[in-house]
Image (cartoon, rainbow, N blue to C red):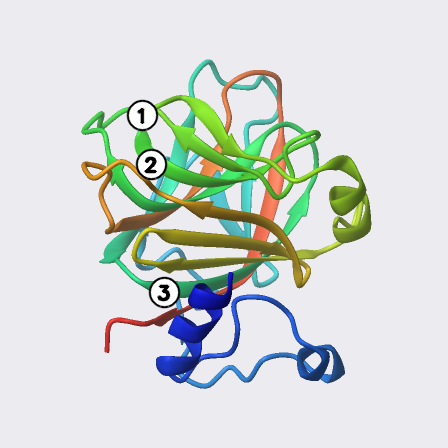
C-alpha cells in the first residue's frame, strides 16, 4: 500500500485512498475531461432502443420484456492509466462499468470483454472480469458495502487504473484494491456501460469524466 501511495504522489496525484484532507472537500476536478455532454450519446455506441438521454442522464433500460444477452453502451476512445469518475442510480437488475475492455466484434449484441466495476445486489463495489475469465476478481465485505452504497439514490463510482494496480471506490470508500498478475491481460481499453441479460431492468448514469495519467 505504501508503494502504491508513493507512486501516485510522484505523479502529482492524491493518494489512491481517501485522506483526512479529502474528507473536508472533494478532490479537485482539474485535468478531468467529460465523456458525456449531457444531451446526446455522441462518443458512444449502443443499441438505440435500449439507451437514451433524458433530463441530462443516460438511461439504459430493457423494459418491458428484458433481453437474453448482455449488451453495452461503448465509448469510442481507449485509455490505459486513468482516474474515471461517474455517478449511477441503480433501478434493479444488474449492470456495471467496463474499463480497459475490448469489443468482442458482435455487431448485434455490442458485447465487450474486460474489467468491470460491478453494479448490482451483492456485487456493488466488486471487480468482475466480463466475458474473459468470467469470475469475480475481488469483492468488498458486506459491512463495507452497507457503509458505502446509498440505496435508491445517486452513487459515485471512482475507478483508478495505474499499471497493474486497480482501485475501486464507492462514494469515496475503497471497496477493491487489486493487482493484476497475468501478463497477457491488456493494460489499455475502452470504457463501456452494461445492460445485463435477463428480466427487465434500468440503470441511470451521469457526470462521466476521466483524467488520463499517461501524460
Q: Nearer the viewer, residue 29 or 127?
A: 127
* Residue 36 shows up from this direction: no
Which residue bears the numbered disc 1? 132
Q: Camera-side residue: 125 or 45?
A: 125
Pick the front one: 102 or 142 = 142
Q: Residue at 39%, 36% (x, y): give it.
A: 72
Q: Which structural element holds mark 3?
A: strand
Q: Quadrant of residue 57?
A: bottom right
Position of 36 relative to 178 (above/below):
below
- The secondary structure type at the circle numbered 1 is loop
| Residues at marks 1 and 3, CA–CA distance in whole angstroms | 22 Å
Crowd around label 1: few <14 · some 14–19 · many ≥20 (10 Å): few
Residue 173 in view in this figure: yes
Q: In the shown orientation, is residue 55 left or right of residue 97?
A: right
Q: Is residue 182 left or right of residue 124?
A: left
The CA span between labels 2 and 1 is 6 Å
| Residue sitting farthest toward the front | 2
Instruction: Check if mark 1's residue and mark 3's residue have beta carbons within 8 Å.
Output: no
Q: Quadrant of residue 10?
A: bottom left
Residue at the disc numbered 2 = 114
Q: Position of residue 59 (x, y in %)?
A: 56, 46
Say which element carries label 2. Answer: strand
Dot 2, how many residues are within 10 Å of its Cα: few (below 14), some (14-19), or many (20+)? many
The earlier-in-sequence mark between 2 and 1 is 2
Amino acid at each position: 500500500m505504501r508503494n502504491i501511495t508513493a507512486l501516485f504522489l510522484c505523479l502529482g496525484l492524491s493518494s489512491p485512498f481517501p485522506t483526512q484532507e479529502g474528507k473536508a472537500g472533494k478532490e479537485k476536478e482539474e485535468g478531468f475531461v467529460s465523456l458525456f455532454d449531457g444531451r446526446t450519446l455522441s462518443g458512444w455506441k449502443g443499441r438505440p432502443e435500449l439507451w437514451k438521454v433524458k433530463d441530462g442522464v443516460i438511461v439504459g433500460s430493457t423494459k418491458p420484456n428484458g433481453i437474453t444477452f448482455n449488451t453495452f453502451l461503448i465509448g469510442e476512445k481507449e485509455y490505459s492509466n486513468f482516474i474515471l469518475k461517474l455517478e449511477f442510480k441503480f433501478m434493479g437488475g444488474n449492470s456495471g462499468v467496463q474499463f480497459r475492455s475490448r469489443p468482442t466484434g458482435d455487431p448485434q449484441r455490442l458485447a465487450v470483454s474486460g474489467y468491470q466495476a460491478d453494479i448490482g445486489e451483492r456485487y456493488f463495489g466488486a471487480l468482475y472480469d466480463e466475458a474473459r475469465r468470467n469470475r469475480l476478481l475481488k469483492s468488498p465485505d458486506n459491512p463495507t458495502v452497507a457503509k458505502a452504497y446509498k440505496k435508491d439514490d445517486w452513487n459515485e463510482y471512482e475507478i483508478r487504473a495505474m499499471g497493474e494496480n486497480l482501485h475501486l471506490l464507492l462514494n469515496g470508500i475503497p471497496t477493491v484494491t487489486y493487482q493484476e498478475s497475468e501478463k497477457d491481460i491488456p493494460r489499455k481499453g475502452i470504457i463501456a456501460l452494461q445492460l445485463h441479460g435477463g428480466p427487465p431492468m434500468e440503470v441511470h448514469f451521469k457526470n462521466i469524466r476521466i483524467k488520463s495519467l499517461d501524460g
